[in-house]
Amino acid sequence: GGPNPGLYTGKRSAALAALEEFGSQQFTYFGPARVVGSKENWRARAANSRFINGLRALVDVIGDWRSFGPDYTTKARLAPPVLATDLALAIAGVATGRVEVEESVRRAGVTTFSQVRERDQYEIADTMRHVDGTEAIVALAREAQAAMEGAYSA
């Protein structure tokens, strides 16, 4: 959908294939909008600007008005990036069993391939262990960091 045809359907297809192959207890989906190596990266700095924060608020308001829900493509483009170290820490925490991720349903609203024919619309609702978006990844990274520090200080 949107300006990135196939991007989200491709990511979803890969996640569902991995889930089928590894099973729900061995697979966790991590979904950063963008990954950067440093807080000094221009995208990381811009993500916290008043202008971008204003655009995020506008997209949220427009999403509330739209009959078919939020514009996830634009939301993803405006989302703050996650630091590579935070993503790695979150993944390590899950892989080592230091942190747990509960199964949840990830909903993407009603969508359509043609954006014209209503009969092509469907709702995405995938159940798996998700860590989706910068806020969730950073929160899990902090939890993993605390768990690992506690394990090494004992």
Image (spheres, rainbow, N blue to C red):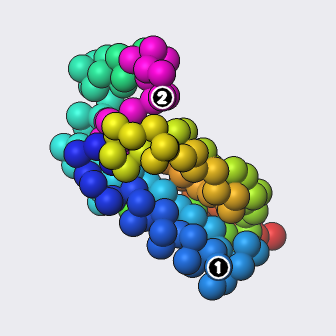
- In the picture, measured across the screen, residue 101 lies left or right of residue 91, that is right
User: Please, is residue 18 above or below residue 122 in the view?
Assistant: below
Name the residue at the bottom extreme: 21
- In the picture, measured across the screen, residue 83 lies left or right of residue 47, that is right
Q: Is residue 122 visible?
A: yes
Number of other residues with Cα within 10 Å of mark 1, as a class: few under 14, some 14 to 19, many 20 or more: few
Q: Amino acid at mark 1?
A: Glu
Name the foreground residue: 114 vs 71: 114
Q: Amino acid at mark 2?
A: Phe
The residue drawn where x is 30% and y is 22% is: 55
Give percent across and percent down for residue 56.
36, 25
- How many badges with numbers are in the image? 2
The residue drawn where x is 32% and y is 30% is: 48
User: Please, is residue 53 above or below residue 25 in the view?
Assistant: above
User: What residue is disc 2 on?
Assistant: 68
Name the foreground residue: 38 vs 28: 28
The residue drawn where x is 57% and y is 70% is: 16
User: Please, is residue 71 above or below residue 58 in the view?
Assistant: below
* Residues in magenta, as a range: 62-80
Q: Give the CA distance from mark 1 to mark 2.
A: 29 Å
Q: Are marks 1 and 2 in contact (CB under 8 Å)?
A: no
User: What residue is disc 1 on?
Assistant: 20
Name the foreground residue: 13 vs 41: 13
